Amino acid sequence: MYRCGKINQLNDFFKDITIREKDTIFRCRIEDYNQDIFEFLKKYFDEAYKKGAVLEDGIANPTEQNLEYFYSIHGNEFQNSIEFFAEKLKVWMPRLNDYQKDILAKSIYDELSGLKKAGKNDNMLKNAYIKFMCWLYYKFEKVVNQSSDFFIPKILYMGTFSKHEMQFLSMISKIGCDVVLVFKDKGQSYKKIDPSDNFSFKYEVENGIDFPSDFSVKKLAEKPVVNVTKIKMTNRANQPVNKQKQPINKQKQPIRKLESVYINATNVWIEGEGLNEILKPYSQRGEDEKCLYTSFIRINGVEDKQTYSNELFNFTEKLKQNNRKYVILENEIEKPSVQDISKIQRGNYADVIQMVNGLARNINYASNLELQKIIYVEFINFFLEESQKFDSNMNKLMNKMVYSLCWLKKYGDILFHDWKKENIGCLIYLGGCRDENEALFIRFLSHLPLDILILVPNLNNKCVLTDEKLYEINYTQSIELNSFPKHGGGLSYNTVAYNAEKELDTLMYQDSGLYRVKQFSKANVIFLKTMFEEIELLWDEGVKFRPGFDTINDTVNLPVISAKVSGVKDKNVKEYLALINKLKASENVLVVQNGNYNISDSKNQIKQYATSFFKNGRLLKEKIKTHNSYKYGLLREDMQDYMLEKLQILIEQCIIKGTYQNGTEYTIISVALNLNNDVIRLIQDFDFTGKNPKVLYFNTTERTCTLEETIFFAYLNLLGFDVVFFVPTGYQCIEQFLNKKYFSEYQIGDYMFDIPTNQVDNVLTSITNKLFRR
């Protein structure tokens, strides 16, 4: 493990590794500026840009796509142990040597153990681990692979330092990296993170001044103007850029490294007959023995809605009659598990050619040597060609190849069982490719002795696959079909009247301003900013008549009221209470007076399981839905999904104080999953284009909302309820547990205390009975 030494002068950074003290790297920070500093940073920048990392504005947090890919590879498991981290690094970054892997695993463990000693919970440790792993893969793959006994990469950091960034750079430097930190704020942000200078030492600049306001990485990257009349085309300034592209550019010489066993004659024989093309016997497709006659077809839409399901069923029945192997994929290709990925043998590769050839050794069809050679050759040729699209990111290409190998193992064992050239298999994909991993795999399969049929009967769906060999058939009619008809007894047949009604339904309710009951299952809540007087006007109006309402595809933009009304206008109690009574008299109003309301019906059975429902910042929705204590299984399926989505948002946006700090997220889950039956009924009946349900909170006392009540009101508001607090005293009621000013506050008049509530008490019972029909 490398240790941090101290420099005598800035040029020590450029000393060859053989001249330095053994296993020594440097970490220093620069807080002042002069011309010498500028010259040093230009030289250091050039080194870091070529074979290291330049970080302007710090290290960006992982994106949602980064996290999604991480979870697809590693799942949700986490253990704070060196063995666990070493195993995960082996899968995540297979090009690391054992020394680097062991150092990084121990470094991650040390940093997380430090966080644990500081009082951080396991969820926080897990989040830090995921962030470190994503940074390693997406930002520092080149750096760690450059580090060796003969070379120390350089990292240049400019930005506002964070604790996680310091921990991460400490880890990276231990495998052999120099780090220079540049702070234009005189190091103020750094001192908050490392007041004792444990991570780096400050370089004292003689006669230093503040950094110029326009100082940036761009300034360091600027090259001096060269007098071309004196220098004969030897401008070395452009060489780093060219060199960085060379590893992959070299692969652009001969893309095809191996000679194919057969000439690929995909689609050259077809005549546009759709399913019948695939059913055509191999002997009728062509006569040239050197060719491999396969089909690669996508059919968009349907020719006849009434017969479509029957046609598909009959198609597979004929495949069976002809003893042809086939695989049906529906709507997605299941991602490989961690166990599947671990079975793919990998190594450390010097270049793309070596990597592709190395991974091809995982292909094993030893019982049929001809098939083995076909797949082996086509795999190498296909992925060498694809490598041109991945710049120098070998890790990204490798992971996509690993996915394809996992899927080939899973489906190829069926499709190529007892393979013969005269009796090829067929892969059927209903719904089409959803992402680039799926598209890449299907395109690779199109080079093998295999027919491929992609069916997209619903024209609202889109298959992302594009390929110049793909033969497309397009129909104008559309039908929703989520599962392939596999059994004759399960087939359905649409009558002419039924199809006519569906077409009329599309004409009437698509972009017409008219809406079918429960037409939409998704909504984005928009909080209206209004005048106080508008609350009364909008309160009883359907949401589709409110400003901001819109429909985009299958989602409604849902404008809702979120307000606190403080004081009494003109001290006129009679008019004030009359307004409250008027609002209470509307349909579907939940009335809460002076906090007298039970947000749940019974003891919270969910609370004890809340911690198991939330991992890695994500709700485990399927686990929640199948749990014995889950209350919402009676609701419409789309409404259940909607409620869980809004619960995720309530946690992610940290609306409630303590979220991600002291376990408040688990309280949020336990409250949101234990609403009382009256509220559940309101939610079940909620139509996103009709009148939305409402909460009217009237408080004349000093009582404030509890944490659970605050969660309850904020969650209902996110679901699309109007929520209005009438607080004549002006006291805080819900603010105590909110991170920000969540509700618009209207100061309508003087504060008044001890207002008699008998004028509203009389209407409470009748309104509640009306609402819930008791």
Image: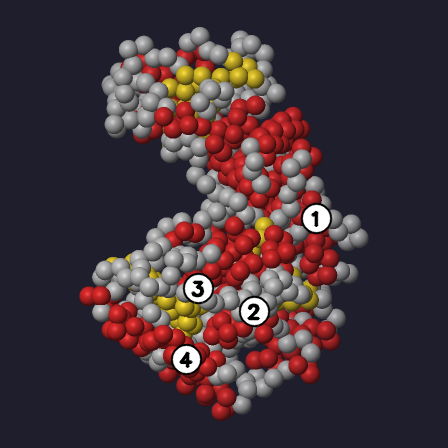
Of badges 4 and 1, nearer the viewer stands: 4
| Inter-mark Cα distance, 4 to 1 | 59 Å
Q: What's under tag 1, amino acid-wise?
A: Gln
Is 660 drawn above or below residue 188 in the view shown? below
State the SS at label 3: loop
Relative placement, left or right, of 99 versus 726 is right
Of badges 3 and 2, nearer the viewer stands: 3
Q: Which residue is mark 4?
A: 767
Closer-to-camera residue (419/488): 488
| Inter-mark Cα distance, 1 to 3 | 53 Å
- Which comes sooner in the sequence, label 1 or label 3? 1
Relative placement, left or right, of 237 versus 20 is left
How many residues crowd mark 1 within 10 Å: few (<14), some (14–19), many (20+)?
few
Residue 323 seen anywhere in this rendered image of the structure: yes
Is 662 drawn above or below residue 704 in the view shown? above
Look at the numbered discs 2 and 1 and tell me whether their residues touch, using CB distance below 8 Å. Answer: no
Is 573 drawn above or below residue 52 in the view shown? below
| Inter-mark Cα distance, 3 to 4 | 17 Å
Q: What's under tag 3, amino acid-wise?
A: Gly
Residue 45 % position (x, y): 39, 23
State the SS at label 1: helix
Look at the numbered discs 1 and 3 and tell me whether their residues touch, using CB distance below 8 Å. Answer: no
Q: Which residue is mark 3?
A: 595
Q: Which residue is mark 2?
A: 601
